[in-house]
Amino acid sequence: MEHFSDKQLAKLLKIPISDFRMLKHGPLLEDQSEQGAILGYFMHISPENAPQLLGKIALGQTNFLWFSALTIKRLLDKEKKPLRKVV
């Protein structure tokens, strides 16, 4: 299981880190196929959050957000910094 920082999760939710730290939510959990392949990740967002904060997050009719494995991979790839050559 991948571990994500608050900063990474805030980027994933497209909210400022200060808003993320106020957000009541569950952990980001893996969504696996029966064969064990990771299909994506999901997170429960508490309905007890302030309406203004919930309005910043693209929640559907449930209080769960789902992210594809590709979305997570892209987030992690963006954060990798290329190595610089020392001349």
Image (cartoon, rainbow, N blue to C red):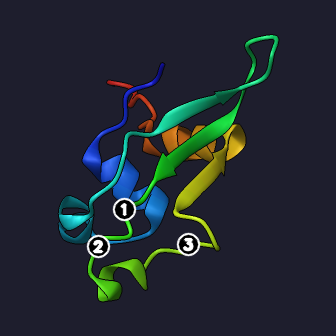
Residue situated in front as seen by the camera: 62 or 56:
62
Badges 2 and 3: C-beta atoms under 8 Å apart? no
Is 27 located above or below residue 35 in the figure? below
At 32% from the left and 80% from the top, the residue drawn is: 53
Give x and y (percent) for residue 51: 33, 86
- On screen, residue 76 versus residue 47, left or right, reads right
8 left or right of 75? left
Pointer 3: what residue? 59
Residue 49 - label? 2
Element assignment for label 3: loop
Residue at x 64%, y 73% (from the top left corner): 61
N-term-proximal mark, 3 vs 1: 1
Assess disc 3: are there few (<14), some (14-19) or many (≥20) residues with their C-alpha within 10 Å of its C-alpha.
few
Vertical placement of residue 9 versus 27, above or below: below
Q: Position of residue 75 (x, y in %)?
A: 53, 47
Q: Give the residue drawn at x 55%, y 75%.
A: 58
Q: Circles 3 and 1: CB distance less than 8 Å?
A: no
Compute the Cα span from label 1 to label 2: 6 Å
How far separated are the C-alphas under marks 2 and 3? 12 Å
Which element carries disc 2, helix, strand or loop?
loop
Q: Name the residue under label 1.
A: 46
